[in-house]
Structures are given as structure tokens and as C-alpha cells.
Amino acid sequence: MIFTVADLAVKAENPLPYLLRTHRDYLTPDAQPQLTVTLTETKPIEQSIELLRAVSNELIKKDTFLLHCSALSYEGKAILFAAHSGVGKSTHARMWREEFGDKVTMVNDDKPFLRFEGDTLCVFGSPWDGKHHLSTNTKVPVAALCFIFRGEENRISPMSAADALNIIFDQVPRTSDPEYMSRLLALLDKMLTRLPLYSLFCRPDHEAARVALKGIIGDEL
């Protein structure tokens, strides 16, 4: 199986049928592999994790990193929604799709990859796209990063890079490899100091999507 994600062509040897299904939109059988991974796990989810780890370790060498978030494109501009597990980032992304219809495309609902191209941060869809398998094999410039918190009312406000760092560090894969961590920390610092950041306290309703959109559009989009 040969597939491409974030411009990296990968050959996965011994893939289970599960991977052939989840990666079908990313298959590039004629591509020249830049990375070959011989899979050893024998269960579908474990094999998927094994492959993701290998891809992440290779992409970080190209200054490309994985972020646990929901990434959607609104009229060609990507917004990243990050949150602690169980808070409801996928639910909030669904509110955007229901509220704004064709203006919204899901880039990835769980594990997209990010890379700076010049001064522009771009998000790439990936086959690791959550339990609902919502993703698009695309690249979109990122307009904002929004951290979601549960709240009794819907309100959005700018967030400092220092406050964002306390949350974002739990949303990226970490290893004991010093070179990997050095690259990752430099990329996170670049992202948090150059990208508009927001905190969104919200309920799981459509008004939350309208409040978030108004807050972000008013500043940057």
C-alpha cells in the first residue's frame, strides 16, 4: 500500500484490510515512496497507530507536525479547534457544518498535520480522522486556532500564547528523542506566536458556531 499525506509518500508493508479502507482517499500507487514502514502489529487499531507513529517521526524532519484537533475549512480558510478529551471539539465542528452548510469542509476531525510554508501555516488532511472518519485529502491555509471549553453561555475572546501553550502541549505526540522534541517545540512556538488564538466557552448548540465565527471573522478572516 502506497499513500501520500502532507506531501510524504509512504509505503506500508503488510497492511490489514482496515488500513486499505481508512487510507483509500490517500492512496497513490504510482508514487515513489519516501518512507517504507513494515507493519508488525496484527490488530487494526494497533497497526494504524504503529503507522501513524512512523509517519509522524518522519514528517517532523520536514518541519511538519501532528495536532490533535478538529480542522475545518470555512470558505477556504482553516480554523483549528482544540480541546481536552471529551470537551466536544467534534461536536462543535458538527455545529459549523449544520449551521453553515456548503461553506464548511472538514479537513480532518482528529489528527491533521501542520506545516509552515513561508509565513503561512497550512493544515493537511490525513487518514487518521477520528471515529466518524471525517477528512478531506487537501491542504488549506490556517486562519486561527481556537481552544474550546465547556460553558453555560457562548463567548469567545483572544487568548495569549502563554495560556495556549499549557493546553497545546497535551495535544501533540511527544517522544524521548531530543531532536524530535527540539523541532516540535520550535514549531509550536512559531505557531502560537504568529497565529490568532482564541478561547471559546460554549454550549453544544448552533449559537456557539455563530458566536465563534463572528469572533474570528471580526479579527482576522
Image (cartoon, helix red, strand yellow):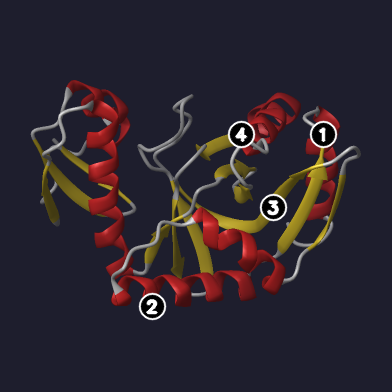
Task: Answer with mark 4 or mark 1, whichever residue precedes in sequence.
Answer: 4
Identity of the residue drawn at 14% across and 57% down = 34
Which structural element holds mark 3? strand
Answer with left or right where residue 179 lies relative to residue 147.
left
Q: Amino acid at mark 4?
A: Ser
> Dividing the image into 4 quarters, which one contains the N terminus?
top left
In terms of sequence position, does the residue under pointer 3 or pointer 2 come before the other?
Answer: 3
Identified at 78% across, 37% down, the residue is 209
Q: Earlier in the sequence, mark 3 or mark 1?
A: 3
Q: Which residue is depicted at the point 24% across and 61% down?
A: 58
Residue type pointed to by label 1: Arg
Question: Neighbour class for label 1 at 10 Å: few (<14), some, many (≥20)?
Answer: many
Image quadrant in which you'd find residue 87: top right
Check contact, mark 3 vs mark 2: CB within 8 A: no
> Which of the 4 image quadrants contains residue 46?
top left
Mark 2 and mark 1: span between their CA atoms? 37 Å
What separation in Å lies between label 2 and label 4 (alpha carbons)? 30 Å
Residue type at numbered disc 3: Phe
From this viewpoint, is residue 130 visible? yes
Give the CA distance from mark 3 to mark 2.
24 Å
- Where does label 1 land, which residue? 203
Callout 2–callout 1 Cβ contact below 8 Å: no
Mark 2 lies on residue: 182
- Whether residue 210 sits left or right of residue 11 in the image: it is right
Q: CA distance from mark 3 to mark 1?
A: 14 Å
Q: Which mark, residue 20?
A: none
- Residue under label 4, please give it: 90
Q: Say if residue 30 shows up in the picture.
A: no
At label 3, counting other C-alpha atoms closer than 10 Å, the crowd grade (few under 14, some 14-19, many 20 or more) is many
Q: Position of residue 118 (x, y in %)?
A: 47, 74
